[in-house]
Image (cartoon, rainbow, N blue to C red):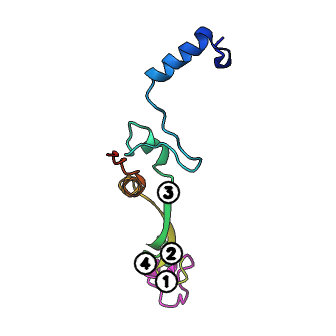
Amino acid sequence: MLEPGYGGNGLRLIELLEEAAPPTPKLSADHAVLPLRLTAENGAKGLMIGEFFVSTRVVCDACEGTGDHPERRATAAKDVDEDCPDCAGEGWTVGKVEVDWTTIKAIWRKAVEHFTAAPEVPHG
Ligand SMILES: [Zn+2]
């Protein structure tokens, strides 16, 4: 068992391991190590695609954007004086549209560009 407080071979082995290993960056609790790019290979595509949506105006499916009651449209009946029940005659509704993979990657690139630490300038 390696117990550095007691000296001897265990302490020397730990010292050798520390010398051989590259230094581990110290991160504060509000930082994380993340990939520079989102790819299918690093699992990001499978994880993130289909996860994000935006609300936007979309053409009403029921009236195809006319705002007319579907019965009036189907029969050309002039006596149907009601608007489309789905969109209240507006011709559009608010729908959820998926954020596409290209946009997700662009947002990630912008965040990486902004938050990537600048390399240290050597002293001297
Ligand atoms: Zn409608």
Q: Is mark 1 within 8 Å of ligand 1?
A: yes
Residue numbers of the magenta segment:
66-86
SS at mark 2?
strand
Give the distance between the C-alpha atoms of the residues marked 3 and 1, in whole angstroms: 27 Å
Identify residue for label 3.
Answer: 52
Q: Earlier in the sequence, mark 4 or mark 1?
A: 4
Let me know if residue 77 is in the magenta part: yes
Q: Earlier in the sequence, mark 4 or mark 2?
A: 4
Residue at image location 36% in from the left, 47% down from the top: 119
The percent position of residue 48, horizontal first and vertical second, equals 47, 48
Q: Residue 90, which numbered label?
A: 1
Q: Is mark 4 within 8 Å of ligand 1?
A: yes
Give the distance between the C-alpha atoms of the residues marked 4 and 2, in whole angstroms: 9 Å
Quadrant of the rendered image containing residue 4: top right
Identify residue for label 2.
Answer: 93
SS at mark 1?
loop
Q: Earlier in the sequence, mark 2 or mark 3?
A: 3
Give the distance between the C-alpha atoms of the residues marked 2 and 3, in whole angstroms: 19 Å
- Quadrant position of the N terminus in the picture: top right
Q: Nearer the viewer, residue 31 or 54?
A: 31
Q: Is mark 2 within 8 Å of ligand 1?
A: yes
**81 to 93, vertically: above or below:** below
**7 to 64, vertically: above or below:** above
**Tag 2: residue type?**
Thr
Identify residue for label 4.
Answer: 65
SS at mark 3?
loop
